[in-house]
Amino acid sequence: MKRKKEIFLGLILLAVCLYSCSTTKDKWTNRTYHAVVAHYNAWWNGNEALKEGKRTLEKDYKDDYTKTLPIFITGTKDQATKIKANTDRAIEKGSKVIKKHSMKFSGKERNSQIDDAYLLIGKACYYSHDYVSAEATFKYIISSKKKQKEMYEPMVWLALTYSKEKKYSEADLTLKQVEKALQEKKAPKRINNFLYLVWAENNIQQGKTYVAIENLNKRKFTFFERSLTTRLKFIEGQIYKDNNDYKKAT
């Protein structure tokens, strides 16, 4: 009798699982199942691969202290080829999430992890120096999430990509839109620091170094980013020195 109960319970659980596996039913159980499986399986593996690639890139990169240091380390094209296995894996896993777990109903995506999958693909393209694909991916997310809070982080990544492509005015315009959304509390607060770091990087690339300092000072201090804060302070000192403002540089 006990064995029969175990078998019966197992069949019920299997039936529930199979029911939840369907991407054609817009039910809470289905959405939750695919969101959890997508996040902790393919997306997580892809994100870990990308993080490993970034660590390798940062380790191999050598700062040139005769020039103003870059805020974001992306390395050279040759260095990017060394992490191709990582970026390719991130793109592969992101694509797998989209293919297997997308749940579109009436033109609206119901699985929140799909946005993260596209963002992962865009980042992987960015770090592999494939800026054309990165730009196209970020634009796709923005267009699919128009007037929603999920569009603003991809907008900042798009601006960073624009800056790498030397499309400085497009980057500035995009960042102004995000700043306005933050001021109106339409964009998530967590992107505040990322926004102003990208803006400062874009300023530096254009030679607008004092404007870059203004944007760096809009960044809010976070305890867990002390090494980044140190790098930013060094960059600020370089800018003051290059402008013969030795007192502030010191």
Image: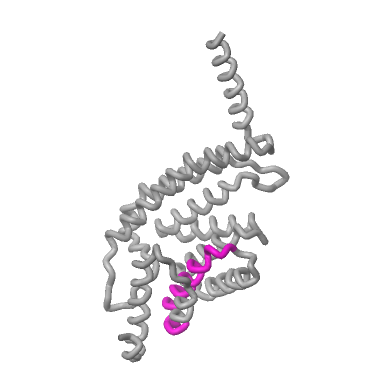
Name the image quarter holding residue 175: bottom right
Identify the residue at the far front of this view: 2
Q: Kindly tell me whether residue 201 is visible in this rendering.
A: yes
Along the viewing direction, whichever of 30 and 58 lies nearer the viewer: 30
Decide if residue 125 is on the left or right side of residue 238: right
Of 150 and 93, nearer the camera is: 150
Q: How many marks?
A: 0
Residue at 48% over, 52% down: 120
Would residue 179 appear left or right of 235 to someone viewing this image? right
Position of 94 with respect to 61 (left or right) is right
Residue 129 in the image: state x and y as whole percent.
41, 59
Residue at point 68%, 48% (across, down): 108
Between 235 and 205, the residue placed more toward the observer is: 235
Tell me if residue 41 is in the magenta stretch.
Answer: no
For the C terminus, the image quarter is: bottom left
Residue 71, quarter of picture:
bottom left
Which residue is at 31% across, 58% downward?
79
Q: Is residue 200 magenta?
A: yes
The residue furthest top is 1
**Residue furthest to the right:** 106
Residue 233: percent from left, percent from top:
36, 76
Quadrant containing the N terminus in the rendered view = top right
Identify the residue at horizontal 56%, vertical 19% (top origin).
10
Give the extent of the magenta segment.
Answer: 188-211
Question: How are the residues colored?
Answer: one colour
* Depicted 28 relative to depicted 184: above or below: above
**Magenta span main SS:** helix
